[in-house]
Image (spheres, rainbow, N blue to C red):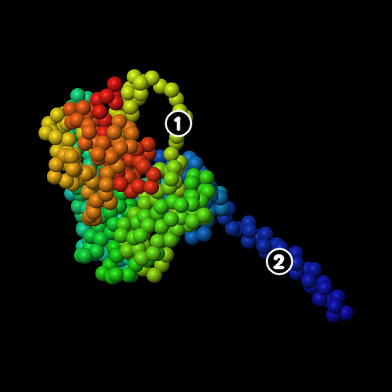
Amino acid sequence: MNRWVIAVIFVVAAPLEAQRTDSAAAARPRPARLVGTVYDSVTGRHLAAAWVTVGSSITTQTDSTGRFRIDSVPVGRVRIAVQHGAIDSLGLNSIVTEVPTRAGAEVAVSLSTPSRETLWRAACPGLPSPTSPDTGFIHGTIRDAMRYQPVRGAKLTAVWYDLRWKPGTAVQPSGWQAEGTSDATGTYTLCGIPGDAVIRLQAIGGRDSTGTLDLALDGRFVVRRDLLLAGSTARAGLVAGTVVDATGAPREGARVMLEDVPEARTDARGRFLLRAVPLGSRELHVLALGYAPIVVPVDVVDGDTTFARAVVERIALLSPVRIEQSHIGARLQQEFEARKKSGMGYVVDSAQIARSTSMMGLFSEVPGVYVSGGRDAEATLFFKNPSGLGGGGQCLANIFIDGIKSDTAMLHLVRKDDLAAVEVYQRAAFVPARYLPSLTTCGSLLVWTKRAFR
C-alpha cells in the first residue's frame, strides 16, 4: 500500500515543479543583443580580429571589417572591453566603456582608439602638435633584465638620417637625434620621430646599455618598444631558435650572429643556439646563402632561454637576357636613381666629387667610412662602428665598381675625374641584395664611373 502512495505523490508533484519552472522563465527578462564596430583613429582603419569582452565571460572577435555581434547580453549596465595589438602599441591595455541594455533590444556601440591629437597631448605635453602626418613618437618601458623591475633615469637616444635632394642639386644628408629619460615607472617617450625613417635606438643606464636596435616605423604614428637593460652583472643568457624560409622549410648552414658573441650555424633542422649572450635587448643578425639578410630583435633575460624564429626570403634571380650595351647603361642609371630616391643609403654625387681633391680624400668625407693608410695607393676602406650606436670596431667595406665585385686595389686604378657617383651602405641590412656578398656582415660601397651610365 505504501508503494502506491509514494507513486501517486510523485506523479502529482512533477507537474507542479514544471509549472514553477515555466513561471520563472516567463518572469526572467529576455536578453539583449549587442552589435558594434572597433575603429583605429590613428590609422583611420577598422580593427579586424580585435577581442571584445562583455562583462567577465562573454567574448567574441571582430570580423575583417571591424564589426562584431553578441547575442544573449545581460540586461542592465554592461562593461565592454576591447583588446588588440594596435591598442597595446599605443600604451593602452584595452578600450573600455559601459552601455545600458534593455530586455529584447538591440544596442549599437562604436568603439575607437584615442585620436592622434589626444595621444600627442598625453605623450608629449607642452610640445606643439606635429604639422606633418608622418611625425609621431616612440615609447615603452625599460626594465632590469635580472629582476624585471622598472629602471629609473635610463638615457634614451634615437638617431636617424634624413637625405633630401632636388633635381639638379646635390644630396643634402642631415643627422638628427632625440633624447629622453625614463621616469620612476621605467617609462620613456621620444617625440618628433619621422614615420618614414629607420631609427637607431639605444638605452644606457649607468654602466649598462642595450645593444643598438634598428627600429623601422613604417609610417606608424606611435611605436612601442619595451627594452631590457643588463643590470650590473656579468651573468649571461641563452638564445635559441630556428631559421626557416617563407615556406617554413628549415635552412641548414645559416650564420646567426649577435654582437660580442661567437656566431652559430644552423643544423639540418634549422636550429641554432647562442651561449653566453649579454643580458638585455639585442639584435640577432641572420645570413643564409641565397637569401636576404635579416635582423631579429631579442630580449635576453637572466635564468631563461630566449627563443627566436627567423624567416628568410630568397633573393630573386633574373634569367639571363641579351641586352645591348646602351640599354645596360640606361638600366643601371634607372636602378641607381630608384635607390637614390629610397634614401636607404648615402649618395655621393658629381658635385661632391668635383669638390674633393683626391679619391681617398673623397671617401674620408663620407659619414661612417674610415680610410686606413697614408697615401692613396696604400689606403684601405673600412666602415666605422657597423653595428650602430654605442659600439666600436670596424669592418672591411665590400666594394663594387660599375656593378662588379672588386676591391681597393682595383679602386686605386679608377681616376676621380671618371667617377659619376658613389653609393654608401654602412650596414649589411640596408645593402641591395644584388650588391651584398654571401655570408658577410659588413656594408658595401657601390662606385659608378661615367662609362657605366652611357
Q: Are marks 1 and 2 in contact (CB under 8 Å)?
A: no
Quarter that holds the C terminus: top left
**Where is mark 1, residue-wise?**
318
> Callout 1: few (<14), some (14-19), or many (20+) C-alpha neighbours within 10 Å?
few
At 45% across and 31% down in the image, what residue appears? Answer: 318
Residue 404 on image: x %, y %: 33, 34
Q: Quadrant of the N terminus?
A: bottom right
Q: Nearer the viewer, residue 364 or 240?
A: 364
Q: Is residue 390 visible?
A: yes
Q: Is residue 399 above or below residue 450?
A: below
Q: Residue at x 75, y 67 (%)?
A: 14
Instruction: Name the residue rendered at 22%, 33% in the picture.
Output: 413
Is 20 placed above or below 72 here?
below
Q: Quadrant of residue 96?
A: bottom left
**SS at badge 1:** loop
- Which residue does the numbered mark 2 point to in the structure image? 17
Q: Position of residue 38 (x, y in %)?
A: 43, 45
Q: Residue furthest right?
A: 1
Work out how far the residue at label 1 is from the one at label 2, CA to CA, in angstroms: 81 Å
Answer with left or right where residue 387 lies relative to residue 302.
left
Q: Amino acid at mark 2?
A: Glu
391 and 173: which is toward the camera: 391
**Depth check, front residue: 225 or 170:** 170
- Tell me the amino acid under the disc marked 1: Leu
Mark 2 secondary-structure assignment: helix
Q: Residue at x 31, y 57 (%)?
A: 259
Q: Residue 179, how many percent across, how many down?
A: 20, 52
The residue positioned farthest toward the bottom in the image shown? 2
x and y percent of residue 424 in the render? 25, 39
